[in-house]
Image (cartoon, rainbow, N blue to C red):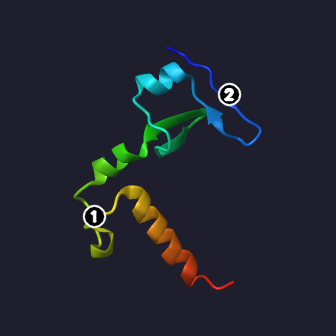
Amino acid sequence: MTYTATITSKRQITLPASLFSELGLKKGQKLTITKRGDELVMKSALSAMYRLYGSVKLPEKYKGMDIDEMIEKAKMEHFSKKKI
């Protein structure tokens, strides 16, 4: 089935509600977007994480955190080390 999405003035994409529900997406969920020729392929970022799960040891400082917490902590650490 083909769906039509809208790109807003802020370059955000609005997915049709039926597609959003059908895929079981949640508000705030992270997606990966891959360019293949002239097509964009979107996948749940969690599915990518689960594919890699176990292949890389999780640093102790991230244990017990969800993926969004890990990302925020890593960003804070990275940007606090940058010289302005």
The number of callouts visible is 2
Residue 52 in percent (x, y) is at 29, 53
Where 59 sits versus 4, above or below?
A: below
Q: Residue furthest top?
A: 1
Taking depth in this image into account, of 73 and 44 the one nearest to the observer is 73
Q: Quick one: SS at disc 1?
A: loop
Residue 30's tag is: none
Residue appearing at x 69%, y 83% in the figure: 84
Classify 10 Å Cα crowding around label 2: few (below 14), some (14-19), many (20 and above).
Answer: few
Q: Is residue 65 left or right of residue 78?
A: left
Residue appearing at x 29%, y 72% in the figure: 59
Q: Residue furthest right?
A: 9
Where 62 sits versus 45, above or below?
A: below
**Quarter of the image holding residue 10?**
top right
Instruction: Report the Cα–Cα distance between label 1 and label 2.
Output: 37 Å
Residue 64's tag is: 1
* Residue with the mark numbered 2: 6
Q: Residue furthest left?
A: 54
Classify 10 Å Cα crowding around label 1: few (below 14), some (14-19), many (20 and above).
Answer: few
Residue 1 in percent (x, y) is at 49, 14
Q: Amino acid at mark 2?
A: Thr
Residue appearing at x 46%, y 43% in the figure: 29
Residue 26 in percent (x, y) is at 44, 37
For marks 1 and 2, the one nearer the N-term is 2
Q: Quick one: SS at disc 2?
A: strand
**Quarter of the image holding residue 38?**
top right
Residue 28 in percent (x, y) is at 50, 44
Q: Amino acid at mark 1?
A: Gly
Where 29 sits versus 23, above or below?
A: below
Of labels 1 and 2, the one closer to you: 1
Taking depth in this image into account, of 79 and 65 the one nearest to the observer is 65
Taking depth in this image into account, of 7 and 35 the one nearest to the observer is 7
